[in-house]
Image (cartoon, rainbow, N blue to C red):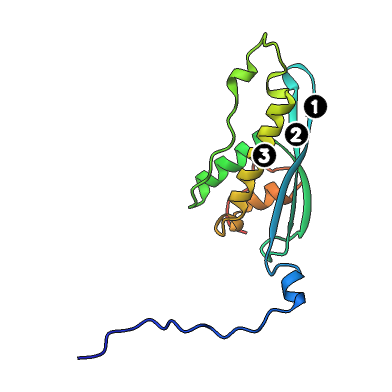
Amino acid sequence: MSQPAVADTRRLNSKPQDLTDAYGPPSNFLEIDVFDPQTLGVGRTRHTVYKVRMRTNLPIFKLKDSCVTRRYSDFEWLKTELERDSKIVVPPLPGKALKRQLPFRGDEGIFEDSFIEERRVGLEQFINRIAGHPLAQNERCLHMFLQEETIDRNYIPGKV
């Protein structure tokens, strides 16, 4: 009989880390910030926009530094596109806050600073979870969302 296979548990030989390795730029990074919320319009056209800044050195992205303006409905569009065309589990967006949109409220509803900040944090978590997924990084809709000033909703879905 042959010997049972035993896993090799020896340590890999690695070079000692120097200061350049320890404090230099990371080998691969992807940073996305959702910031600077601004409320625009009046009445039924009133809405909040957010800046979405991406910095990366991943070769899959054509731009290494980009900043675009997006509103909540753009995040909804991205989620719908990814659910339709990709094989990844798409995390939930922060809620629509329907009760905050009711008329005759004593506050600003969805335009109150605390709600806007809570939503901003939720949107930032959402986009970082999506963009960090290796399969999502190949989707054309994600690249358009992060790097193009306007979203072409008539684009042809597919891989980059």
The kind of residue tagged 3 is Val
Q: CA distance from mark 3 to mark 2?
A: 13 Å
Q: Residue at x 67, y 11 (%)?
A: 105
Q: CA distance from mark 1 to mark 2?
A: 7 Å
Q: Check disc 2 and report the residue beneath it.
A: 49
Q: Quadrant of the C terminus?
A: bottom right
Quick check: 76 left or right of 20? left
Q: Check disc 3 and report the residue beneath it.
A: 121
Q: Is residue 110 above or below residue 102?
A: below
Q: Earlier in the sequence, mark 3 or mark 2?
A: 2
Q: Is residue 129 above or below residue 107?
A: below
Q: Residue furthest bottom?
A: 1
Secondary element at image label 3: helix
Q: Nearer the viewer, residue 45 or 114?
A: 114
Q: In the rendered image, which quarter is residue 64 located in?
A: bottom right
Secondary element at image label 1: strand
Q: Residue furthest left?
A: 1
Q: Earlier in the sequence, mark 1 or mark 2?
A: 1
Q: Residue at x 63, y 19 (%)?
A: 100
Are dots 1 and 2 in contact, CB under 8 Å? yes
The kind of residue tagged 2 is Val
The percent coordinates of residue 62 (x first, y second) are 73, 61
Q: Residue at x 77, y 45 (%)?
A: 68
The percent coordinates of residue 119 (x first, y second) are 66, 33
Q: Check disc 1 and report the residue beneath it.
A: 40
Q: Is residue 122 above or below residue 55?
A: above
Q: For mark 2, does the 10 Å Cα neighbourhood hold few (<14), some (14 to 19), or many (20 or more) residues? A: some
Quick check: 136 left or right of 58? left
Secondary element at image label 2: strand
* Dot in front, 1 or 3: 3
